[in-house]
Image (cartoon, rainbow, N blue to C red):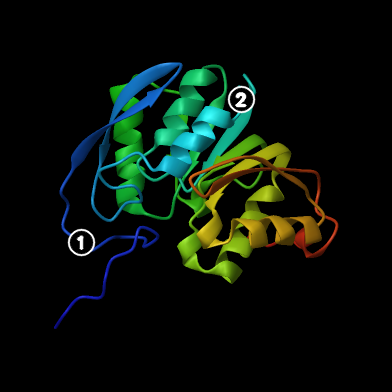
Amino acid sequence: MTQPPSHYFDDDPTVESSPQEVDLVLPDGRMSLTTDRGVFGYGMVDPGTKLLLMDVPTPPQIGNLLDLGCGYGPIAVTMARRAPGATVWAVDVNERARSLCASNAARHGLANIVVASPDDVPPDVEFAVIWSNPPIRIGKEALHRMLLRWFSRLHGEAWLVVHRHLGSDSLQAWLQREGFGVERVSSSRGYRVLRASGAPSGPGRIDLDPA
């Protein structure tokens, strides 16, 4: 019987592991990271992720920071390196992604990263900033629920990168309808970097955290 295809947003990818090394090169440093099949960005640094990391401001130096949908960890390790006094929560549903992120953090001596599944983040943890290349392919409804869940714990700004062909403009419009202040900070090769701030005034006020 043929196995169903494995996706990067699966809890436990069934595709056979085949690790590859990639170099994340940014103006403030270079890091080698391990990627794997069944995890977003296999064998590459996603260009949207790199654009986000080039454009975001320096993160808060204390408090809790969130990489939402961490994958193998390029955003989390950059956050942790730029804010050594803060705690970076690297959150992903994908078990293989979490394992890779943890090993990449350890490899570079970044002890301020906490890798966790979404339901393992304590409910009293709130975030000073969110950086994310969100998992658009989970579907619009699931994506909206995910963003509202984590934005309800945000006391600062969220920085998102989404490709135009994957709905960046419609996502920006939806966030605005939810009551967030949103602006497009930059764009390149079809990717848009969005900055969202403010408390939701619409349906986003509903507590969407599962019991």
> Which residue has dot 2 on it?
59
Element at label 2: loop
Quarter in which the N terminus is drawn? bottom left
Q: Which sits earlier in the primary sequence, circle 1 or circle 2?
A: 1
Using residue 139 as the reference point, say whether residue 7 is left or right of it: left
> Residue extending furthest right?
201
Figure disc tally = 2
Quadrant housing residue 103: top left
x 33%, y 63%: residue: 7
The answer to which of 149 and 163 lies nearer the viewer is 163
x 85%, y 57%: residue: 201
Using residue 165 as the reference point, say whether residue 158 is left or right of it: right
The answer to which of 159 and 191 lies nearer the viewer is 191
The x, y position of residue 50, in whole percent, is 45, 35
x 35%, y 41%: residue: 72
Q: Which amino acid does the dot numbered 2 rest on?
A: Pro
Mark 2 neighbour density, 10 Å: few (under 14) some (14–19) many (20 or more): some
Q: CA distance from mark 1 to mark 2?
A: 35 Å
The answer to which of 3 and 43 lies nearer the viewer is 43
The x, y position of residue 83, in whole percent, is 55, 20
Above or below — where is 29 with respect to 100? Answer: above
Quadrant housing residue 63: top right
The x, y position of residue 85, in whole percent, is 56, 17
Using residue 33 as the reference point, say whether residue 58 is left or right of it: right
Above or below — where is 79 with respect to 67? Answer: above
The x, y position of residue 155, in whole percent, is 74, 37
Element at label 1: loop
Q: Which amino acid does the dot numbered 1 rest on?
A: Val
Residue 211 visible in image = no
**Contact, mark 1 vs mark 2 (Cβ under 8 Å):** no
> Which residue has dot 1 on it?
15
Mark 1 neighbour density, 10 Å: few (under 14) some (14–19) many (20 or more): some
